[in-house]
Amino acid sequence: MRHTGFRRTVVAFGVCSSLALAATACGSGGDESASGKTRITVNCEPPRSAKVDRAFFEEEIAAFEERNPDIDVVAHDAFPCQDPKTFDAKLAGGQMEDVFYTYFTDARHVVDVGQAADLTPYLGELKSYDTIQKQLRDIYTVDGKVYGIPRTGYSMGLIYNRALFRKAGLDPDRPPATWEEVRAAAKRIAALGDGTVGYADYSAQNQGGWHFTAELYSQGGDVVGADGEKAAIDTPEGRAVLRNLHDMRWTDDSMGSKQLLVINDVQQMMGSGKLGMYLAAPDNIPILVKEKGGDYEDLALAPMPGGKGTLIGGDGYMFAKHATPAQIRAGLKWLDHMFLTPGDGFLGDYARARKHDAPVGLPEPRLFTGAADARDQQAKKADANVPVENYQAFLDGNRKLRMKIEPPHAQQIYSVLDGIVSAVLTKEDADIDQLLEDASEKIDGILARS
């Protein structure tokens, strides 16, 4: 599923308008501007409606061009960064920008349709490459060749309300580490009454399938087998996920009576102080505060319960097949400047972000390793304006978890998985074994058609 928010993931996408086409095509059509400089087109510039982020982006491009007077950067904007309705058409038509935004789940597809430039011979131009987490680099590595560069990453965790934990007699500094502990904590929180819900989950608009996947990963399971040809949900781990949801909903009554919830519903519940826990990535926290009425002091983040795995996602940039060697070298330098210098650039200038009241100190994205990570964390800590201690459990626990990307054909599969999650949460007599068997057959069909 997709996450938005300019401070974590810039959400703009360069779909060419007729005006833009008159000035320059989405693809550059050549690597030299009128001045003889190497010209690169890039996308995912924040739209004009996002005034602060737009200004930051333009400031960074200007600074980059000043440092690299032989490079001309032409940025395209729109909303969102990647529009599923136009993405494949632009790929097929060779109309992608020279440097274009992708979700992690796009990488293999772009390579398979022959629209990605091989970056492997040019990686020496990217000073930061070896500092990026290997598991994120691997997402854009296909058959030993590198086709893209990660820009941000997220992982799922358990957001919880410290105030409700205290009120229910739970220790807010010791969040649940297992699903049994989640169930026990949810029951105590729900017992507070007055419409308080212990634990909430999504079960509509493909979001239920997304969370089922995250919960399955946390149990050590998978959605699709290692060969990519068959579903892997009809397993003890799959049954454990559904049984736990069923029992919290019907035996404990800790999930409330209203179901078929989506992200906005659950965020509203948490922001209003009526929800104890739900699964989310760190970028939910500022939304809960700025849009839903929550308080940073009350909101904390723990790693995924279960201790075996967590779902990760994120984004990066790939280069169009038509990009020339000069454009690839220029584009890699641009990525280093904009996104991949710890404590600096568009996403990393924490002092600038704090000055404009953007949250600084959230535990993700955590893109780097080693000394680069230490520099980034130190810079973030120096300008933190949120209670970083509330997220320490998440940071510590994530180091022990297996990080797993979304399954192939994720949205089609999530649509199937939505059905089994919604059935368990709306029908007390739901047949879990039959639900998993039927869903497996549907997923097998999706995989067979790919």
Image (cartoon, rainbow, N blue to C red):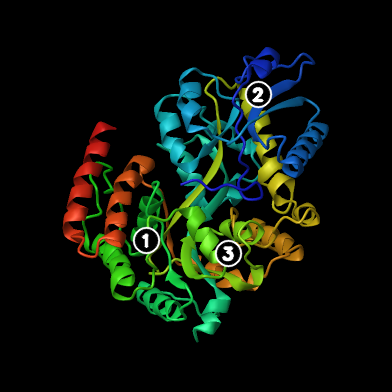
Disc with the residue nearer the chain's start (1 vs 2):
1
Which residue is at the front of the view, 289 or 27? Answer: 289
Identify the residue at horizontal 69%, vertical 48% (top origin): 347
Identify the residue at horizontal 59%, vertical 37% (top origin): 123
The reply to whether residue 399 is visible in this rendering is no
Disc with the residue nearer the chain's start (3 vs 1):
1
**In the displayed structure image, the side of residue 372 where residue 60 appears, left or right:** right
What is the spatial separation of the Cα atoms under label 2 and label 3, in whole angstroms? 49 Å
Instruction: Tell whether label 3 touches label 2 (CB within 8 Å).
Output: no
- Kind of residue sitting beneath label 1: Glu
Q: Which residue is mark 2?
A: 326
The reply to whether residue 423 is visible in this rendering is yes
- Kind of residue sitting beneath label 3: Gly
Return the mark for residue 215: 1
- Kind of residue sitting beneath label 2: Ala
Which residue is at the front of the view, 9 or 34? Answer: 9
Please tell me whether mark 3 sits on a helix, a strand or a loop.
Answer: helix
Which residue is at the front of the view, 13 or 366? Answer: 13
Q: Looking at the rendering, which quadrant does residue 330 occupy?
A: top right
What is the spatial separation of the Cα atoms under label 1 and label 2, in whole angstroms? 45 Å
Q: Residues within 10 Å of mark 3 (few under 14, many from 20)?
A: many
